[in-house]
Each structure stands twice: as structure tokens, then as C-alpha cells.
Amino acid sequence: MWTEKTVDRESQQKLYVQMYSIIREKIEKNEWPIGTQIPTEDDLCKSYNVSKATVRMAITELVKNGYLKKQQGKGTFVTYSVPGLGIAMPVFVPPLVTALTVLVLSREHAAPLAYISGSLGTLIGADLLNLGVIQALGAPVASIGGAGTFDGIFVTALLAVILASFATRHDVRSSSS
């Protein structure tokens, strides 16, 4: 099948810890990319010749550490969270989407709408839409805040304003005449 690394029954390391390492390595090496479903517990048991309890313990730890997310009735998936960092997103995606959306809604009021939407969109996108992932981050408390969070939201809003402003430039001389 797809097994390269195996568990070492002679090792002092517990089997579930070895399984944890094998699965984590597949995720970190992008053999199992973000968003993909990992093999079932039964398939992992057969492939690595370990018990279901061993596989479940490894998966439970990977969920706690933000590598995996279990969806009841659907399976276990590689998550979008970055272990030790949280939920990550490319820096220019929120301001770009905000600026384009605001320009479609109202060119005349693009800048103020971009600022409001950029701030709220970042909060909503990063927090409310990822409520299911927050538990997988393994943090004892989930909050909006901390070093750089305000700056990130503020900068997103300002970038959205700047991008929207480029598309709504007015000729100053013609309006002052």
C-alpha cells in the first residue's frame, strides 16, 4: 500500500507516539495536503499493524495539536491551522477581496466601506468562520487579541482603503472649479 515508515515494536517509544510521528511527518511533508481526508482508522491499523486504540490515541493528539480535524460521519481531515501559530491566511487576500467587494457595492463610498469591511471582514473571517477549528488549536482560551492582532486588522483595513482608493480617484481640479 502506501506505508514507507513502520512502527518499531522493539523501540522504547510507545506505539501511539510512533503513529503520531508517522502521520505528522506525512502532513508536514505535504504527502497529505491541507484539507485532504486521511485514511480511515481501520486502514491505518491494517497498514501499520497496530490496534485501533493506538491509532485513535495518535489521532486524538494530532487533533489537539492542530494537525487534524475530525468531522463526525465524514472522516478525519488535515486542518488549515498552523500548529503553534493558529489559523493562517495569505496577507493580501483579505484586503484584496474587501476592496473588490466594496467597489462593486459603492464606488462613491469605497474608502469608508473598505475600512469598515476590512476590519470586520478580518475578524469574521478569521474567527467566526473558523469556530470549528479553534478547538483543534489546543489553546486553553480563544480570544481576539495578542501581539500583532490589532496591527493585522488595522493594516488589512488600511490596505483595503488604499486599494479601493486607486479605483475611485477623482480629478481634484474639476471638482474645485
Image: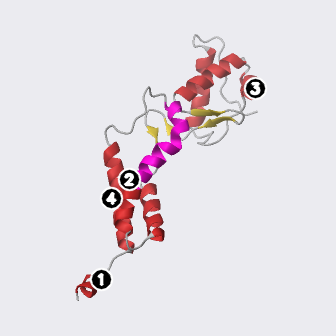
Tell me if 151 is positioned left or right of 133 in this view: left
Check if residue 73 falls in the magenta segment: no
Residue at point 26%, 82% (across, down): 172
For the record, the magenta segment spans: 118-137
User: How many labels, in total?
Assistant: 4
Q: Is residue 7 visible?
A: no
Residue type highlighted by circle 2 = Ser
Q: CA distance from mark 2 to mark 4?
A: 9 Å
- Indicate which label's residue lies in the foreground, 1 or 3: 1
What is the basis of the colouring in this image? secondary structure
Label 1 neighbour load within 10 Å: few <14, some 14-19, many 20+? few
Residue type highlighted by circle 1 = Asp
Residue 158, labelled with which disc? 4
Residue at point 49%, 32% (across, down): 137
Among numbered discs 1 and 3, the one appearing first in the sequence: 3
- Determine whether the residue tagged by mark 1 lies in a helix, strand or loop: loop
Tell me if 120 is positioned left or right of 25 in this view: left
In terms of image quadrants, where is residue 51? top right
- In the image, residue 15 sits, relative to residue 27, either above or below, namely above
Q: Residue 177: where, in percent of width, then height?
A: 23, 89
Give the residue furthest to the bottom. Answer: 177
Question: Does the CB distance between marks 1 and 3 fall below 8 Å?
Answer: no
Residue that numbered label 2 is attached to = 119
Residue that numbered label 3 is attached to = 42
Question: Does the CB distance between marks 2 and 3 fall below 8 Å?
Answer: no
